[in-house]
Image (tube, helix red, strand yellow):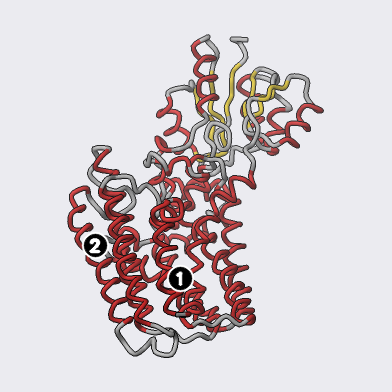
Amino acid sequence: MSDVALVVDLDGTLTRTDTLHEGVVKLVKTRPLDLLHFPAWLGAGKARFKHEIALHAPLDVSLLPYDEALIERVGTARAAGRRTVLATASNVTVARKIAEHLGLFDDVIASEADKNMSGVAKRDALVARFGAGGFDYMANAPVDKTVWSAAHTAILVNASPKLISDIKNSKEHVEILSEKPKFLASLIEAARLYQWVKNLLIFVPLLAAQQFDGASVIQAGLAFLFFGLAASSVYLVNDLLDLEADRLHPRKRHRPFASGRLAVLPGLFTAAALGLGSLLGAFIVGPEFALVLVAYLLITGAYSLWIKRKPLLDIIVLASLYTLRIIAGGAATDTPLTLWLLAVSMFLFASLAFAKRYAEIVDVFKRGESDVEGRGYRSGDQNVIMALGTAAGVASIVTLALYVNSSTQSGLYSTPEMLWGVCPVLLYWVAHIWLTAQRGTLTDDPIVFAIRDWESRAAFFVALIPVALAVWL
């Protein structure tokens, strides 16, 4: 078979992603004003559009999620004397960078600024060079059927069951290298449904006001649902904007988008659908809640695009987003909020946000790196971050103590003095979070960590005791 060339497609085959779609996402992140040029670029044709994206948003090809089994297969074929060719509809600049990075290919066939090398165009170019049946073709998409029809062997990589069945029924020489990952499972993982636990803050105003009527609980439940949809939409967008940074991280590189298990385009469509659904649902709850949800989406959008790379400002915004959930709960149930509650929330969640950044800095220091990728922090910042974070935690406890000693809670509790018992429990828990972070074992978001951590769960239930005594004693 050494006289039969081995031709490999790029997007979805050699890489588990689409380089054009990743380029668009990177352009949105790094040069958002260039979106104004999209109509002109698209009007000049798809080939021109690809050229402009490759020019204005160059990818770091060393970070792309490659199919290691396929790379080994191509390397073995080349070592055996077979001619190997990268043939792709991606822009030639991207294709050549990848070919140079991998060092696996003798030649590259790709789209130029004035010619889109897809479907029939790719087939004709390969037949002109190798003759009909003079090459085997590795690819993954229905658009490749035209090329497979002229190939000696159709090698399917990352292909859907339907496409595999169609090719087996239409071609004699077929080889299945791998099947497409399960879309729904990867999508659910990327949507991070477990993070919806943060939206339980929506119920805090009801609990603080001891307002447990059925209508209010239903309103809060709907608010929880629609806020969850919005949050999942934000997580999808955030992961897409963080692709390169996540691929440099030892754990985040396994996320669905970063690893290539979930494609960019379906992720964008799903994010848009979830975001739109959350907004439509928010108006069912009420206009005030809808306004808060719009503010949440706008702030998180700004956070993903810019704020997350601004030291300290990112912490304030993260704490505000937690507090915004409490404000959303008050808006959804028409429950008045006290400044005491909002102050405790801001200080407490600022402390947790500092702890999250501190854990990331410790992780970077352990790996011998100097900067936190995708953030504005350096390994030398850990002392000041710890000082600010522990101070914010203590401030939340002091604010809670002042609330207990104020007249604000009069009428809500039979024995308000019992609420003092919450303060030492909260002090213990904040100290526990920071001790865990300092020891380098806080590898998750602090809220997610608290759910999995038995000491945090125990502290929560112990804190309920003085609250119950204050209400019923």
Left or right: where does residue 422 sit relative to residue 452? left
Which one is nearer the viewer's eye here, 339 or 208?
208
Badge 1: how crowded within 10 Å, few (<14), some, or many (20+)? Answer: few
Left or right: where does residue 49 sit relative to residue 337? right
Q: Marks 2 and 1: which is nearer the front? A: 2
Amino acid type, label 2: Thr
Q: Residue furthest right?
A: 169
Which residue occupies 49% across, 52% down? 24
Residue 132's spot in the image, x, y percent? 70, 21
Residue 200's spot in the image, x, y percent? 51, 67
Tag 1, which secondary structure?
A: helix
Residue 41's spot in the image, x, y percent? 52, 55
Between disc 2 and disc 1, whose residue precedes?
1
Note whether 7 is above or below 314 in the view shown.
above
> Residue 16, located in which quarter of the rendered image?
top right
* Figure label count: 2
Is residue 85 visible to us here? yes
Which residue occupies 64% across, 21% down? 136
Note whether 430 is above or below 366 in the view shown.
below
Note whether 443 is above or below 414 in the view shown.
above
Residue 298's tag is 1
Residue 89's tag is none
Amino acid type, label 1: Leu
Tag 2, which secondary structure?
A: helix
In which quadrant of the rendered image does the N terminus lie? top right
Which residue occupies 42% across, 37% down? 61
Which one is nearer the viewer's eye here, 77 or 201?
201
Which one is nearer the viewer's eye here, 276 or 463?
463
Question: Label 2, label 1: how many angstroms apart (C-alpha)?
Answer: 29 Å
Residue 32's spot in the image, x, y percent? 42, 61
Q: Which residue is mark 2?
A: 390
